[in-house]
Image (tube, grey):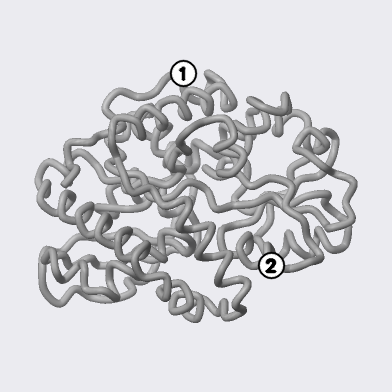
Amino acid sequence: MRRLIAVLACVVGLAGCNASKGDDAGEATSGRVFRLGVIPGAQDFIVYVMESRGLFAKHDLAPEKVQMLSPVNLHLMIAEQEVDVGFGGFTTMAIARARGKNVIAVHGIFSPVNLVFVLDDSPLETLSDLRGKKLGIFGGPGSTTFTFLGVIAKRWFDLDLVESVELVSAPGPALVSLLDRGEIDAALLGTTESLKFSAKGTYRVLVDLSGEYRKHHTRVPAHVAVTTNEDFAASHRDVVTDFLRAYREAVAYVKANPAIWAEYGARIEMVDEAEVEILREKMTANLVGEWDAAQIETQREYLELAFDVLGDAVVKSVPEGLIRDDFNP
């Protein structure tokens, strides 16, 4: 547990951890300028739709994209106000606020598209079977996605992943190699890898994170949220509200125009028709289109479960003021 706390402290900038600023993907040409932090994955897709369909321009928004490869770096930049708006891991942002950062979550984006894979001939059938085994994780034990899996494991499978499973952290491609060689028993993969490997017959899904959560609750919490800080939100309320307006229009566009998936698939070098169909199915199902009272209650309930997994040494309760709905368009 001490190791997990250290990782989380690094993420919210409370330890002397290094974080590098990515290159801006483009300069604003007109409109209201703000710094938008982006990493690859599901959030990159929604930004692509907002940008390519002219929704930023429609609402007079001119984001200067700050692109990073690591969620850790993005979370640090959000917490330290080095970006104005970003897609933050929900539990990580909650911990940051509990530690004194003035971050706020103003809308959910996606519930997890991530999957845990085993080899097709693996004897493992449920999460319970991972006890004493090796689990590869792409984002490390401090990641939002791992926390989400930890909630599922503890709540419905009586399994503490940190205490009862040997964790192996590595990038997605390395985890696949380790799984193929039998050096790990299962792998929690990132969004893109999860979608690609769903279409391959040599692997089997042990756990669909959102699918498993949905078995027990009507709604699934967003594990990634539109996040900003109180200072920017107070001085640029119109920007935050119009960003959310553009986001909701992007969600509506995606649902009405399924051809967008093949287009985006080509952009991320996913051209196999089976893979594109899985991309469409999984990501559409897990888009968070509403930020109403029911969704906010779902987020609060999830945080209570997450904090039970993380322990009181990390955070004891849902931080006051974390979840805001007053920017809803």
Q: Earlier in the sequence, mark 1 or mark 2?
A: 2
| Residue at numbered disc 2 | 199
**x 52%, y 37%: residue:** 8
* Image-quadrant location for residue 96: top left
Q: Which residue is mark 1?
A: 316
Work out which quarter of the rendered image holds the N terminus and state it. top right
From this viewpoint, which residue is outermost toward the front? 256
Of helix, strand and loop, which one carries label 2? loop
Q: CA distance from mark 1 to mark 2?
A: 40 Å
Q: Would residue 157 be found to the left or right of residue 50 on screen?
A: right
Helix, strand or loop at mark 1: loop
Residue 40 shown left or right of residue 38 in the figure: right
In the displayed structure image, the side of residue 145 where residue 83 appears, left or right: left
User: How many discs appear?
Assistant: 2
Q: Nearer the viewer, residue 185 or 13?
A: 185
Name the residue nearer the viewer: 102 or 120: 120
- Image height check: is 110 above or below 251? above
The residue shown at (81%, 58%) is 179
Kind of residue indicated by mark 2: Ala
Q: Position of residue 301 (x, y in %)?
A: 45, 25
Q: Eyeballing the image, is 157 above or below 33?
A: above
